[in-house]
Image (cartoon, grey):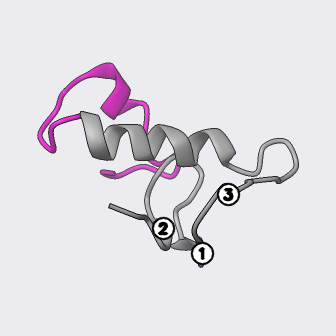
């Protein structure tokens, strides 16, 4: 499986959709200033692949948007 683009919506600081892509073959470098959401992106990817959709784990709760609501 290859990820070609990612859209984050209602995850921590991203209350509006944020699109990342296109992602090409090979090594991809993600370079942004501090507090831009790099860790949020990787935490969301980790949850996507390794947590159940209905998980009540602290990892899933930590992804709730700062503005309130569900992930």
14 or 42: nearer the viewer: 42
Percent coordinates x, y for residue 12 in the rendering: 52, 46
Could you say which is closer to the camera, residue 22 or residue 36? 22
Side (left or right) of 48 relative to 10: left
Residue 63 part of the magenta-drawn span = yes
Which residue matches tag 3? 28
What residue is pinned by disc 1? 21
| Label 3 vs label 1, nearer the camera | 3
- Residue farthest bottom in this picture: 22
Give the image location of residue 18, x and y in percent: 57, 71
Report whether residue 64 is seen: no
The vertical placement of 22 against 7, above or below, is below
Circle 2: element type: strand
Determine whether 57 is above or below 39 in the image: above
Circle 3 crowding by C-alpha within 10 Å: few under 14, some 14–19, many from 20: few
Give the extent of the magenta segment. Answer: 51-71
Please report contact status of discs 1 and 2: CB closer than 8 Å, yes or no. Answer: yes
Which comes sooner in the sequence, label 3 or label 1? 1
Q: Is residue 70 left or right of residue 32?
A: left
Q: CA distance from mark 1 to mark 2?
A: 6 Å
Q: Which residue is painted at 11% across and 40% down in the image? A: 54
Whichever of callouts 1 and 2 sits on the residue coming sooner in the sequence is: 2
Label 1 residue SS: loop
Mark 2 = which residue?
6
């Amino acid at each position: 499986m290859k990820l070609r683009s990612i859209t984050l919506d209602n995850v921590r600081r991203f209350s509006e959709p944020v699109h990342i892509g296109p992602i090409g073959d090979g090594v991809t470098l993600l370079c942004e200033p501090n507090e831009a959401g790099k860790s949020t992106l990787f935490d969301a990817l980790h949850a996507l692949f390794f947590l159940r959709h209905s998980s009540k784990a602290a990892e899933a709760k930590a992804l709730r948007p700062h503005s309130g609501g569900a992930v």
